[in-house]
Amino acid sequence: MIAALRARNPIKPGKLRLGIGDDCAILRPNAGDELAITTDFSLENVHFRRDWHSPEAIGHRCLARGLSDLAAVGAKPMAAFLSLALPKELTARHRGKPAWVERFFDGLLALAAKMNVPLAGGDTAESPAHKGKAGLVAADIVLVGGVKRGRALLRSGAKPGDLLYVTGPGLGGAGAELLALERNPSRFTALKVAAPGHPHLYPEPRIAAGLRLRKRGLATAAIDLSDGLSTDLHHLCGESGLAAEIDATVVPIHPMAQLAEAAGWARSALQLALHGGEDYELLFTARPQTKIPRELDGVAIHAIGRMSKMRNGKPAVTLLEEGKAVSELRARGWEHFRGSSSD
Amino acid sequence: MIAALRARNPIKPGKLRLGIGDDCAILRPNAGDELAITTDFSLENVHFRRDWHSPEAIGHRCLARGLSDLAAVGAKPMAAFLSLALPKELTARHRGKPAWVERFFDGLLALAAKMNVPLAGGDTAESPAHKGKAGLVAADIVLVGGVKRGRALLRSGAKPGDLLYVTGPGLGGAGAELLALERNPSRFTALKVAAPGHPHLYPEPRIAAGLRLRKRGLATAAIDLSDGLSTDLHHLCGESGLAAEIDATVVPIHPMAQLAEAAGWARSALQLALHGGEDYELLFTARPQTKIPRELDGVAIHAIGRMSKMRNGKPAVTLLEEGKAVSELRARGWEHFRGSSSD
């Protein structure tokens, strides 16, 4: 498998001097660059289900989780590493059809090619059977990116008065598509190629938008929306030592979330937008005088609120409607399938 | 758990600008340095067993696997990242006793402190129960090291005529201690602190020796012995495009391997030394005219053979006795517990 991957993923001249096949991969950063590094688990029955998700979508999502963390700090991807544990049956071809693991790599490497990031190494192991039951898939993705020294976008950089923005066509889409998947997984198994407009199955990490925000000095702080707006905004507030207000009437809502509400799968599209996780959009802050374009690299940008000082007795995040406080917004991002916490 | 780790593992000024708590960790490499990066799984029932290994030894071994890969390329450790999936029960204290996961981090962080490498981030998840059975522990360690540009020790650098060396007090010790552990695991559960002389439970990655070899320009190629001498030497031969000869009479044999032979647990101590895995010593090559000291930083160095050109019909690795070829040495490193392949 390692030899096959090596052949499929040749080293191109560039930042990666040495890839799969030695004790370590060797990366050559640009002079003056810092390295941004993130690791993310994708575990069967925690982050995906093999009876719901195609192997291609699982591979795509695995890499997308890590890329989204790089996007959040404004880093340019240099290399990815994958540790992959599989039950043996998933490495076998049946009647000439590609093995599960080949299709997993089809999905992962298609996104890697699109984002121009080489798979530089990792580890493989057989996932052990346990008390007579077949083992589960466990994938850990590591992403390394470069960012100019001292210029990474951090969660901790927001200032009182900064405005809050989100990228993308609207929030809650991933949560809505998951609700549809739960109800009728067989409708989705044919989706073997990353198609736009599938926020749960094929999320689009906002690498280009993150790079623009950082290089043009537009943002003061940023985080990616993996746990859901309410939870991730609390993280940003916590690290910046600030409170925030969100205007519910301007939070962009993904068309799929509207559809989930219409179908009766969710009580309200707004709730999906506020608490549905895994949208992998960027949430960022900018000084009020900074002119933020309506879109960055074709990705829409929406103002949704502002940062303020923390005060005793005041909630960390308040939900407004037309300028009036209506409720406290508690962190209650969805935890899909089962509990999992993540950077 | 993340907050507790952050408190236990404060960021010191240095290469690590930003650790646990943001989307990515940020590392600042030295000017002109390249980055060496490696990832290694430690999976329950593949790489360890919870009824055989103390949590401290599992944590130590998890980090040691990654450090040993950095040692093999002559890199200086900068930061470690850990993705850890656990069944929920292992995070709970019982009757005031530390939780399993606390003891795991005791072992991991003790080695990290000794090697001066901060734990800079990672991911945590609950290991899912599967068909009514409790989940298994899965840990993926990522190590990042710095190495002067173009100077990393690679598997591919050996030349015909180079001599072959191994570090350490002898090979086969880890395999021998594992044989003892198999027979009587309860004898070993009290070993909660890394003690010298426990090559399986508390291996000592050869970071200092690897750095010396690289900085003093002594070695032409190197690999760490994780799969066993026979297998890892085949890897080195393959990447260098060469054959090798090993003199069986000078391969250093660990005292524990002698003991395992005396106890009747292994057919021969030499077989343990040739094929037993996880010794985590360094195997390296040097030009014949290079003077190699008898020890580096207190670690013994032994010459065990030489590299030669590949010839049709000649085995890649030949075993000699007193200068005469006696047999082909096939790659058959031990795969403990179950199959696992690894960089």
Image: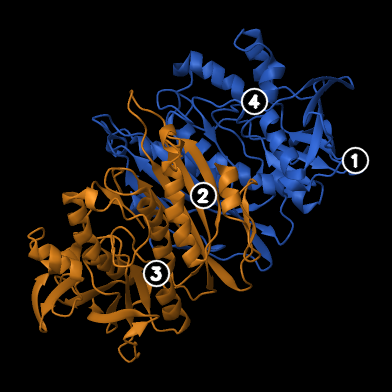
Chain colours: A orange, B blue
**A239 or A19: nearer the eye?**
A19
* Gap in angstroms between the C-alphas marked 3 and 2: 21 Å
- Mark closer to the observer (3, 4): 4
At numbered mark 3, what does the secondary structure look like: helix, strand or loop?
Answer: helix
Res A80 visible:
yes
B110 and A161: which one is in front? A161
Q: Residue furthest right?
A: B289
For disc 1, the chain is B
- Earlier-in-chain disc, 4 versus 2: 2
Q: Evaluate whether label 1 is on the same chain as label 3.
A: no
- Coordinates of residue B111 in the picture (x, y in percent): 54, 42
Q: Position of residue B336 (x, y in %)?
A: 53, 26
- Does mark 2 fall on the same chain as mark 1? yes
Taking the spot 69% from the left edge, 38% from the top edge, the residue there is B235
Badge 2 amino acid: Val
The chain to which mark 4 is attached is B
Instruction: Determine whether, in the image, residue A29 is placed left or right of residue A290.
Output: right
The mark found on residue B288 in the picture is 1
Q: Which mark is residue B142?
A: 2
Give x and y (percent) for residue A92: 45, 35
- The residue that mark 4 highlights is B332
Residue denoted by label 3: A72
Locate residue B240 relative to residue A333 in the image: left or right. right
Q: CA distance from mark 3 to mark 4?
A: 45 Å
Q: Residue at x 66, y 8 (%)?
A: B262
Mark 4: which amino acid?
Arg
Q: Quadrant of residue B283?
A: top right
Q: Is residue A253 above or below residue A68?
A: below
Q: Nearer the viewer, mark 1 or mark 4?
A: 4
Please report, as a chain letter, where disc 2 is located.
B
Closer to the N terminus: mark 1 or mark 2?
Answer: 2
Residue B19, image quadrant: bottom left
